[in-house]
Image (cartoon, helix red, strand yellow):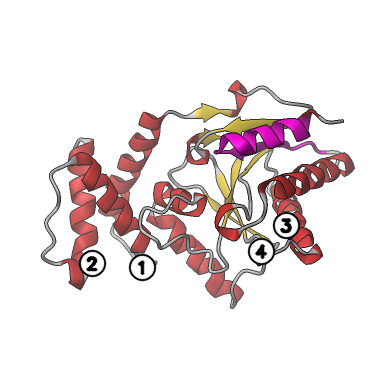
Amino acid sequence: MNQAQRRIFLIQTLLSERRDCANMQIPADTDQQKRLLRTLFNIRMPRPVSEEFLQIQDEYLQQETALKGITLLEDLTPQTDNLYLWQGDITTLRCDAIVNAANSQLLGCFYPNHGCVDNAIHTFAGVQLRDACARLIIRQGREEPTGRAKITPAFNLPSRYILHTVGPLVHGRVTGEDRKQLACCYRSCLELAQQYSIGSVAFCCISTGEFHFPNDCAAEIAVHTVREFLAKEQRRIKVIFNVFKDRDYQIYQKLLRAD
């Protein structure tokens, strides 16, 4: 089965789960098919799925990621001792763990084809991730508090684990509580990494974008908190600050070069 055949199988299976899509025609165009498949992944609630579906989905997603190109931590150059800066798609980075800027339900972004990191991670990890996160919330008995962190396998991503953390949602001016909660996100992820003997962690820009934390302020908190944590711990964790925008790259580059 090639990628086109896998994609059609996945679309047909996901459409068959939905009564409102029973008569939907699958577009012939490859890009439109990919958008439709991502939409179906995004809007699908956690529920059981067949082993056949998982096998074909896993083959499809892993091949798609390989086609995008996988970046290895070993190929990155540290900005300073154990601190890295990398601009790119976090779903293509191979390290021990990547950090997801999650929502309080931990279920990923349900907005079809949205550009947030939460959407990308859940899309390319596969449907297993939403199911795993749903089980975490059920076991916890409540939504995930801001500033805490949870761990799941990365499933079809190149990394081994995903650390999910809920950052503060900023309304207007940044408050002292906003700053405290964002710092807690970074500490909670690093503490969880230590607990699971994780040697490398890639942080996305938590709480920026849709959560409206100013980029420069968020970066200052991120770098300060990580440096402070690593200075107190004997076991060194390699930390990658992952950015997507040129502006964020420039902000982090300046911060990491500072003494």
Q: Residue 148: tell me if it is visible.
A: yes
Mark 2 near mark 1, Cβ–Cβ under 8 Å?
Answer: yes
Which comes sooner in the sequence, label 1 or label 4? 1
> Which label lies toward us, 4 or 3?
4
Which comes sooner in the sequence, label 4 or label 3? 4
The kind of residue tagged 2 is Glu
Q: Is residue 3 above or below residue 74?
A: below
Which comes sooner in the sequence, label 2 or label 1? 2
- Separation (CA) of disc 4 from disc 3: 10 Å
Residue drawn at x 87%, y 40% is: 231
Mark 3 near mark 2, Cβ–Cβ under 8 Å?
Answer: no
In what element is the residue under mark 4? Answer: loop
Q: Disc number at residue 47? A: 1
> Which label lies toward us, 1 or 3?
3
Rendered location of residue 11, percent (x, y): 22, 53
* Residue corresponding to mark 2: 17
* Residue corresponding to mark 4: 170
Q: Specify the segment rendered in magenta.
A: 235-256
In what element is the residue under mark 3? Answer: helix
Residue drawn at x 77%, y 45% is: 220
The kind of residue tagged 3 is Leu
Which comes sooner in the sequence, label 1 or label 3? 1
The kind of residue tagged 1 is Arg
Residue drawn at x 60%, y 59% is: 211
* Residue corresponding to mark 3: 182
- Separation (CA) of disc 1 from disc 4: 33 Å
Mark 1 near mark 3, Cβ–Cβ under 8 Å?
Answer: no
The kind of residue tagged 4 is Val
Mark 4 near mark 3, Cβ–Cβ under 8 Å?
Answer: no
